[in-house]
Amino acid sequence: MARAETREAACGCGRLRVTTVGEPDLVIACSCLACQRRTGSPFGVGAYFKKEAVSVEGDARVYSRVADSGLDVSIRFCPGCGTSLWWSAELRPDHYGVAVGGFGDPDFGRPGRVVWSESKHPWVRFPDGVAEYRQGTPRPKAE
C-alpha cells in the first residue's frame, strides 16, 4: 500500500511548522484586500486540507476577523517572525488552509480557482482553465 505524501510548511524563522498528509482538497488564490495586506503581495494562495490531515508544531498567535464573505476566519501566525502560516475559516469548517508559500515548493500544484478577482491587480494573470470568481466562491444553495 502506498504511503500518503507528507509535506511540511514553515514560517520564516522555522519555529512554527505545519505537516500535512496527502493532497489538498483544493488550492485557492485570493485577491481580496485583506489577503493582499496579510501577505504583502497582490494575492494569497492557500491549500485546504481536511483537519485530520494537518498537524502543527510550535507556538502560534491568532488573529480573527470577519472575511469579505461575512464569515469568520482565524489566522495563525508565528509570534517570532510574524509569518501567517495557517488558518481556519467558517466557510470550510472541516478544513485548515495552509499558505502555499510556506511549503517552499515551487512544484506545489497551481490554484484550482481564484476568488475576489474584483480586487485583482490588472497585471496579474492566472493560467487558462483556472476558474475566477468576482467575489468569493458561490455558496451552495440551501435546500
Image (cartoon, rainbow, N blue to C red):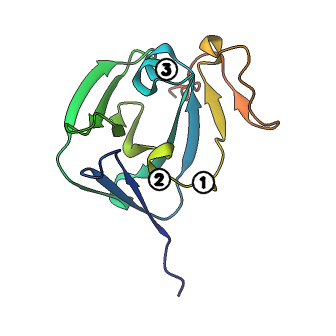
Going by the numbered disc 1, the residue's amino acid type is Phe
Image height check: is 26 above or below 55? above
Q: Is residue 131 or residue 9 the one in the foreground?
A: 9
Q: Position of residue 67 (x, y in %)?
A: 40, 18
How packed mark 2 is, by other alpha carbons closer than 10 Å (few <14, some 14-19, many 20 or more), is many
Instruction: Name the residue that disc number 2 marks.
Output: 103
Using the image, determine if residue 4 lies above or below residue 93: below
Up-down: is 82 above or below 50? above
As drawn, the label of residue 36 is 3
Of 69 and 111, which appears nearest the observer?
A: 111
Q: Earlier in the sequence, mark 1 or mark 2?
A: 2
Mark 3 and mark 2 lie on one chain; the one further toward the N terminus is 3
* Cβ–Cβ under 8 Å for marks 1 and 2: yes
The front one of 27 and 16 is: 16
Q: Is residue 107 left or right of residue 6?
A: right
CA neighbours of label 1 inside 10 A, class few (<14), some (14 to 19), many (20+): few
Seen as rendered, the residue at the extreme right is: 128
Q: Residues within 10 Å of mark 3 (few under 14, many from 20)?
A: some
Tag 1's secondary structure? loop
Label 3: element kind: helix
Residue at the spot x=71%, y=23% of the render?
124
Which residue is disc 1 drawn over? 108
Mark 1 to mark 3 CA distance (whole Å): 21 Å
Q: Position of residue 89 (x, y in %)?
A: 36, 33
